[in-house]
Image: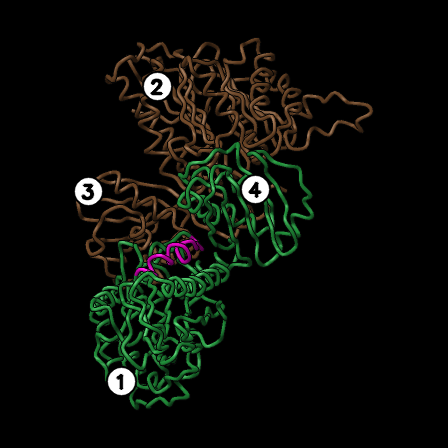
Chain colours: A brown, B green
Amino acid sequence: MLNQISGGVCAAKGFRAAGVRCGVKSGMSLGDGNQPIVPSMKDYLSGKFDLAMILSDCECAAAAVYTMNRVKAAPLYVTMGNLEDGVCRGIVANSGNANACAPNGHENAERMCAAAAGATGLKPTDFVVASTGVIGQELNIAAIEKGMGPLVEQLSTDGSDAAANAVMTTDTKKKEIAVTLTIGGKTVTVGGIAKGSGMIHPNMGTMLCFITTDCAIAHDLLQDALHEIVPRTFNRVTVDGDTSTNDMCVVLANGMAGNPLIEWKDDGYTLFCQALYQVCEHLARSIAADGEGASRLITCTVRDARSEESAERLAKAVVGSSLVKAALYGADANWGRVICAMGYSKAPFRPEYVDISFASALGEIKVCEKGVGLPFDEDFAKRVLTQDAVTIDVSVHEGDESATCWGCDLTYDYVKINGDYRS
Amino acid sequence: MLNQISGGVCAAKGFRAAGVRCGVKSGMSLGDGNQPIVPSMKDYLSGKFDLAMILSDCECAAAAVYTMNRVKAAPLYVTMGNLEDGVCRGIVANSGNANACAPNGHENAERMCAAAAGATGLKPTDFVVASTGVIGQELNIAAIEKGMGPLVEQLSTDGSDAAANAVMTTDTKKKEIAVTLTIGGKTVTVGGIAKGSGMIHPNMGTMLCFITTDCAIAHDLLQDALHEIVPRTFNRVTVDGDTSTNDMCVVLANGMAGNPLIEWKDDGYTLFCQALYQVCEHLARSIAADGEGASRLITCTVRDARSEESAERLAKAVVGSSLVKAALYGADANWGRVICAMGYSKAPFRPEYVDISFASALGEIKVCEKGVGLPFDEDFAKRVLTQDAVTIDVSVHEGDESATCWGCDLTYDYVKINGDYRS
């Protein structure tokens, strides 16, 4: 039994978090330059946060997956190095600059870890480092170094919100969840935060997602669990088909729940995977729902497929189609675009077996049977599709496998947000 | 030497064309139903045309390529059957309904050929049949059958414009071209028309494209030429990443130029391929420039690649990226999205070797060298990118191969057009 609780990445025992504004984009406004003013904590806590930390009271087993984009941001390479031993203490992250294809990228990512180490008394390699924002501009590392002290000062068990806010860019909603479960008689908590709104088409890695747990679990099993679950959750989300250079999903497990260490794929592992799945699924859906400019969440489930892989490929093509996305913005039951997207997905299926329905909280409407259009009530369809969350249900009548993928509609606001993101 | 001339598909000797409005979408408004009125030719020539014919005075060698979408519209299957012998006399096509996943699709496509045959005194199998428009609704075959007589009556050597208009859907501009060349001392003409604006991401086949030539060329060489050229032209265009169910590109060669029959891959074949390439490239670029809602044409050339295939893959990812497209709508020199799209293209390259420039009629501006951002004049960049045609020039410094792909920007109007295309 999983219980959803509040607290995000600080819900699990022994984790603190914080977020501040250090001024990554423009630096802090601190006087006229001739007379540098030492900013007060109030300065660091006003405006849009851009620097986050999550810290465990003790060493954590750490697992991570990264973007499959051939262009990877510098912090990913630094994190890969720091996690080579499978353990770490915390995460430091900034928004406003991706530190990808940027001058002095590797050096600045290392300086960010060093600053975190300096402010906490830990080692630079104890940190996961992550960045998100504009590609190609040099990171304002001086601002980050200055802000690190105030950031560490703010660390608290109430800090999940602030950390989640600090990693947001074009996100409009915070993505946060925590669940508890019982393993070996002990209450174990798994919580996470994520950011992601545009450049969302994760491939093995994902947008920024930080998950903490007090579960005692061996590092290799933590990595196995993450590798099992990310492909079924984050990798089934698409906002715009653009796989980011900075995607990263990290889980830290500090063992403070006191459960017997999970060392085998036993019942405890299965339970932990269920909790991790719920956390990842929730955050993945939240990212799709908060896709740049999105007005509604689109869920596509393909059923009765010959394999889960082909069901996933079909569902992903549907939620990824610009034409399906634009049609759903207009609440238009244009199922022809659904079957067209399936057709170019490269997954095998027979068009003449396909049934398609649209559904939402208002009801379900079948629009295509055996590959041919059905007459349907356009007015009712319009009402069904005007809801915040719409499901496209497809059966291909070829087997027993299914998969669900998530996306969002394509709106004027997506174009607006991305027409001039840098300014 | 190729000369561009007017006349479109009627520029070559022995071809006539026509377009009329038969009322595929709503039927003709012909009285109250109790007293059917026989529509006049004026009725058939007013409003948006939706029925087109191209007819040769004598038998043509015919070559065609079709969409790779697993869901293919009925007219494609009927055309494949009719072209099995490699010859035909003409093309009949409608807009307003794709006849894909539609009730009685195959039967209606055959009735369309039969109606064309009835009105011309030819055989149903003498025709290529094509449809474009909404997927999943039954074709109004009665309207087409009624309109066939007036259509054939309108056939003339001035009819290319009318035919091009009749196959347009969301297109805002007619796509038409003709060129002449000399083969074996004879003037040979190659001309074509195309339609395509949305659901454009051709794969081996393409949107609707009809090309005529009076060149004498054997059927198998005509097919070879088309197979060589379509992948380098139409298949390098993307508007929205959605490969249509109805894509088709057909070339008819009636031999009336009187040149020695091209039976081998000799100089004549090479010359003919150059002309066919110019026609296809022009139409492909026109389709990209007239992409749904587009405000500018985007051309991406990737140079110095290790293979043409990888150059094409990289360029296609760039012009296909929603984020690149939205940035260019905003005239934002956001090259980070260019290298990001290259990164997820699955083509091999080293980010640290990449140079990127933006260019237009106003000049060129280098924004990235060896994978790292360069300082550049943002105001000048804005001016460069505000032109109608913008080029993204990428060098990957790994070899000698290159490829060019075409696309367009992503605008509010794309969303508007596709938010409610059916109504």
Measured as percent of width and height from the top left, residue A380 is found at 34, 59
Under mark 2, the amino acid is Leu
Closer to viewer: mark 4 or mark 1? 4
Name above or below for residue A214 compared with residue A418.
Answer: above
Marks 3/1 same chain: no
Marks 1/2 same chain: no
Measured as percent of width and height from the top left, residue B5 is found at 49, 74
Say which chain tag 4 marks.
B
Under mark 3, the amino acid is Arg
Q: Name the chief secondary structure element in magenta.
A: helix
Q: Which residues are magenta?
A: B224-240
Q: Which residue is mark 1?
A: B119
- Residue at image position (48%, 23%) is A77
Q: For mark 1, give the secondary structure.
A: helix
- Residue at image position (33%, 25%) is A275
Closer to the camera in the image, B71 or A23: B71
Q: Which residue is mark 3?
A: A306
- Dot 1 crowding, Cα within 10 Å, few <14, some 14–19, many 20+: some
Q: Which mark is residue B356?
A: 4
- Residues at marks 3 and 4, CA–CA distance in whole angstroms: 44 Å
- Residue at image position (25%, 65%) is B74
* Marks 3 & 2, CB-CB < 8 Å contact: no
Closer to viewer: mark 1 or mark 2? 1
Under mark 4, the amino acid is Ile
- Residue at image position (38%, 27%) is A4
Closer to the camera in the image, A337 or B220: B220
Q: Quadrant of residue A274?
A: top left
Q: Quadrant of residue A260?
A: top left
Name above or below for residue A97 compared with residue B130.
Answer: above
